Amino acid sequence: MAKWILRLLLLLVIVAGAAGAAAWWLRQQATTPFRGFAGDEVFVDIPSGTGPRAIGARLAEAGVVRDPLTFRVALWLTGQARDLKAGEYRFSGAATAVDVVATIADGAIYTRPVTFREGLTLAEMSDVYADSGLGTRDAFLAAARDATLIRDLDPVADDLEGYLFPDTYPVPRQTPAATLVAQMVRGFRAAPPADLTARARADGLTVRQVVTPAALVEKETAQDAERPIVAAVYRNRHRIGMGMQADPTVIYALQRAGKWDGNLSRDDLQFDSPYNTYRYGGLPPGPIAAPGRRALEAVVSPADVDYLYFVSRNDGTHVFATTLAEHNRNVFQWQVLYFRNKRANRGDNAINR
């Protein structure tokens, strides 16, 4: 009887030792970088609703962890089995299974920055979307026609022109156009002055009547100091019933019609479109581009000036005038003489060569 007891005890010791060794080995596997990782980077997509076992299988198949069992051991060691989050993850080198669990539990999904600069139209934004490899231009434009996203702000809008806020967005690689567009609308809601709507109403304006001239300001000048002045020019013109006569509205009209060739001619100023503010009075029917925060601020807080005109100095800045006579002198100096002298200088340089 004593011998059987001794043998049983010995067997238990052996089993316990083997179990301990196995546990030690599994812990080592879970806490040691996986040497089988190949390549510079690996992307693993974890769809919503994927369970821990399936996640482990995906990671093992991608060569991120040794095998599903090692991943489950890492989950047991960390206690984070219920913290795993869906998304696409990027792994750029050998990592321990414990570190892999931490990455997924933290929700550190892979994103890359996509920048939409101020003053872009929906068509131009669709180019950015497509060029970033996120999807097609048509998909973005289709999503941008969902005016219900801003119906509470602009009941008459038939698309999101002007309401997709220009900014840099961290975007996962597999981001549907509708998801990004909704994010950009949220950006618009969060970015303008907090009291934009209240200040607009105080001036008897709707949000659309702020965004529309703000788009003109955005297209006319990139100088922060000039934005309130340009905004004042358009407000002054509107107040006295003077035409906006804004070149960007003609360009936008030509773009919508597929007739913009990159050069604005005098004949183009007669192009028949409700967006052409040389032919039709008042503001254009809606925004012609996406204004940034400073352009929106300029419209609700324009400069206290009487200017009605401005002309480019050809260096990104403008000369402003109150009277037409003064404006004509500025046009002669900064457009006629400027380019005449520039052509003459080119001719002299050609002779000297």
Image: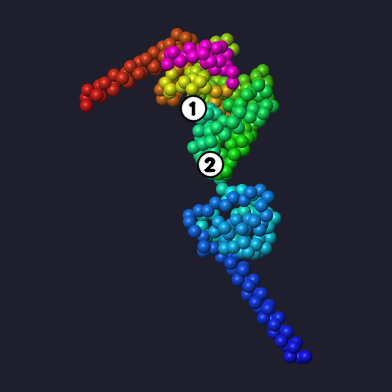
Which residue in the protein does label 2 denote? 113
Q: Which residue: 56% across, 15% down?
A: 274
Mark positioned earlier in the residue sequence (1 or 2): 2
Residue 79 lies in the magenta stretch: no
- Residue type for callout 1: Ala
Label 2, residues with CA under 10 Å away: few <14, some 14-19, many ≥20:
few
* Label 1 residue SS: loop
Query: In the rendered view, does 51 fall on the left or right side of 245?
Result: right
Q: Which residues are magenta?
A: 265-286
- How far is disc 1 from disc 2 in space, using C-alphas? 23 Å
- Which residue reaches farthest top? 325
Q: Quadrant of residue 261?
A: top left
The total of numbered circles placed on residues is 2
Q: Position of residue 217 (x, y in %)?
A: 53, 23
Q: Position of residue 104 (x, y in %)?
A: 62, 53
Q: Which residue: 66% across, 24% down?
A: 154
Does residue 254 show up? Answer: yes
Query: In the rendered view, does 156 fall on the left or right side of 174?
Result: right
The one of 86 and 314 positioned closer to us in this rendering = 86
Location of the C terminus by quadrant is: top left
Does residue 193 show up? Answer: no
- Residue type for callout 2: Pro
Q: From this view, report whether residue 130 is shown above or below residue 70.
A: above
Q: Which residue: 49% across, 37% down?
A: 131
Main secondary structure of the magenta stretch? loop
Q: Position of residue 316 (x, y in %)?
A: 44, 25
Q: How is the image coloured?
A: rainbow
Q: CB under 8 Å between callouts 1 and 2?
A: no
Q: Nearer the viewer, mark 1 or mark 2?
A: 2
Q: Position of residue 240 (x, y in %)?
A: 58, 10
Location of the N terminus by quadrant is: bottom right
Which residue in the protein does label 1 denote? 222
